[in-house]
Amino acid sequence: MSSATLTKTPDRAKVTAWLQNYGVYLAVVVLLLFNIVFTENFLSAANFRTQLVQAAPVCIVALGMALVIGTEGIDLSVGSVMSIAAALIPLYLGAGPLMAIVVAVIAGVVSGLFSGYLVAYLGIQPIIATLALLVGGRGLALVIAHGQLVQLHNQDFLELGTGDFLGVPIMVIVAGVLAVLAGLVVQRTTFGRHLVAVGGNRAASTLAGLPVKRVLISVYVISGALAAVAGVLATSRLAASDPSDVGLLMELSAITAVVVGGTPLTGGRVRVLGTVFGALLMQLVQATLIKHNLPDSTAQMVQAAIIVVAVYVARERSSR
Amino acid sequence: MSATTTEPAARNAAFAGVLQRQGAAVVLVLGLAASWFAFPHFGTADNLRSLVLQGSFLAVIALGMTFVIISGGIDLSVGSNYALGGVLAAYGAQYGLVVAILLPLAVCSLIGLVNGVLIARTGMAPFIVTLASLLFARGLLLALTSEGATTYKVDPGSAFLWLGQGTIFGIGVPVYLTLVLFALGGLLLRRTRFGQSVFAIGGAEQSALLMGLPVARTKISLYTLSGALAGFAGVLTAAYLQSGVTVIGVGTELDAISVVVIGGTLLTGGAGTIIGTLVGVLLRTLIQNVINQIGTLDSNYQTVVSGAFLLVVVVIQRLLARSRTR
């Protein structure tokens, strides 16, 4: 067994490395081709619009998640932060859409500060620090909203989720701009370099005098703010504030998008473009299954399989 | 508390240690006493009976989670496994008592086994593997119930129902079963080589490997055990509710992790107790009960309080751990 695999190792390692770097793009292309050939009415501008718009919230949340995972952390609270943002919208929409959005995003920032403080200053494991907010956050959102779904009628606000700018859906533009910003932050800023260093080796970063705590707290704040933005967009698209449903299981989708996109869970590396394609892939998988009349249950099992395969491939790379 | 003894630091550290281990028990006793006086109905036999019965289902799940967390892992799939176990039990009940118990145990153990193999043999992170099986088990459950539209009802005359609804000396059968499982769990953890391996792996996996302990086999057994216990909790719930309810178990993994942590088991692994978990479950059930007693309180506060409580306990644990190492 060992001698046989030894001789094959270089090839296998090469394939795995290639898959880890480009697998997500390949998967998106393959799935697109499959749909273009086998799915009725797939190749239309309207359909591409729908796919992009539906992928936008996951993509936005996944960008923040990618930064958190880059520091070897995890943010389980994103779905609940979305619901808090959604619950706040109807309360402040009377003062104008901008006011409502600002309040929602501030709530996201505060949530992020909270998780970040626990992780960075108290040294609590990210999974537990954000678990508390996952459990309590949705309850808080439901308390704020009195457990009610509220229909929204403010046209200016609804424009966010349904409107266009130069023919491109506003939601897609927002996601695109945020993705570019995230890419620039990771590639071009000191903060980005610090982030990757902290995730790669926290002890060494501390010894090297990097602002480890500030970096850690910042990624959770960014993640919270982006989750709030996604909550605002999802609310606007739905034309209703539904804190009991918005962002449910979003932490799973976002983590999957990040991991599928080639960012290892062990930190030290962030792949922004991969994350965007990871979000697109998850959306395409779902759309493919729905368009071929496969039920929700199958979609969940397929998503489970994708997670396992993606993490398995990532593991080969990191353990090499 | 005033540091006047000859070795104040050591004394404080010892005190912190006791508090870290017994803090939940102290809070539980105080909470019980306060609730007893504050709410006229709290101390009634009926309420106390329902309190321990309600707690028993979560306790069975949390038992498996305690083992997994002591080994330094985590099992996010228990909520889905719990719901799946309940549906399979209710479905199996039409073929008799044995099928109703063994079918869910077999399927849920198998899911746990796959978790264990993936974690132990490939080195993938436990939380991502069990996250995937959370989705998978919920998907399987939906497929079995035609997307959640079918509810399997248990025939009212079925002997299976005794498991959930029967009583001995006025106390529900699930409570006794839970106590038996916890006693067995305690023996397994404290009196066997397997238990020693679990602590060793959670303390320092590399050392455990070098010591020649069966690390992979132990991990696989742990996740299988956790899956089986979650499935068994589903069996009890199905017998109690007379049907396989598809919507239960969402977020139960979080409840289970919370009570384990509240009970003093460290999430970093290597330390923890079974009794602590039992105390954690009672505390969680007490909080729920009190919120129900208040009545006027929005039921959504329940999750807010749970989240806040978990957080307070973790922060205190963390601060105490710091003061001990100082």
Image (cartoon, grey):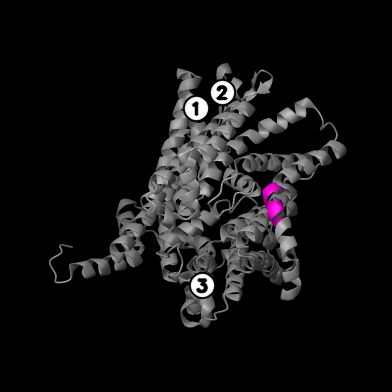
The disc placed on residue A55 is none
Residue that mark 2 sits on: A152
Q: Using the rendered view, name the quadrant where residue B109 is placed.
A: bottom right
Observer-nearest residue: A316 or B264? A316
Q: Distance between the residues labelled 3 and 1?
A: 50 Å
- Left or right of B316: which side holds B203? right
Asked if residue A21 lies in the magenta stretch, the reply is yes
Asked if residue B119 lies in the magenta stretch, the reply is no
Q: Which chain carries label 2?
A: A
Q: Main secondary structure of the magenta part?
A: helix
Observer-nearest residue: A68 or B267? A68
In this view, B311 is above or below A231: below
Pointer 1 with pointer 2, Cβ within 8 A: yes
- Left or right of B137: which side holds A74? left
Residue B260 x %, y %: 46, 62
Q: What element carries label 1?
A: helix
Determine if marks 3 and 2 fall on one subunit: no
Residue that mark 3 sits on: B206
Q: What element carries label 3?
A: helix
- Left or right of B146: which side holds B231? left
Question: Label 2 is placed on what type of residue?
Answer: Leu
Residue positioned 54% across, 63% down in the render: B61
Residue positioned 76% across, 26% down in the render: A46
Disc number lying in front (1 or 2): 1
Residue B254 x %, y %: 51, 54
Residue that mark 1 sits on: A89
Q: Give the range drawn in magenta.
A: A16-22
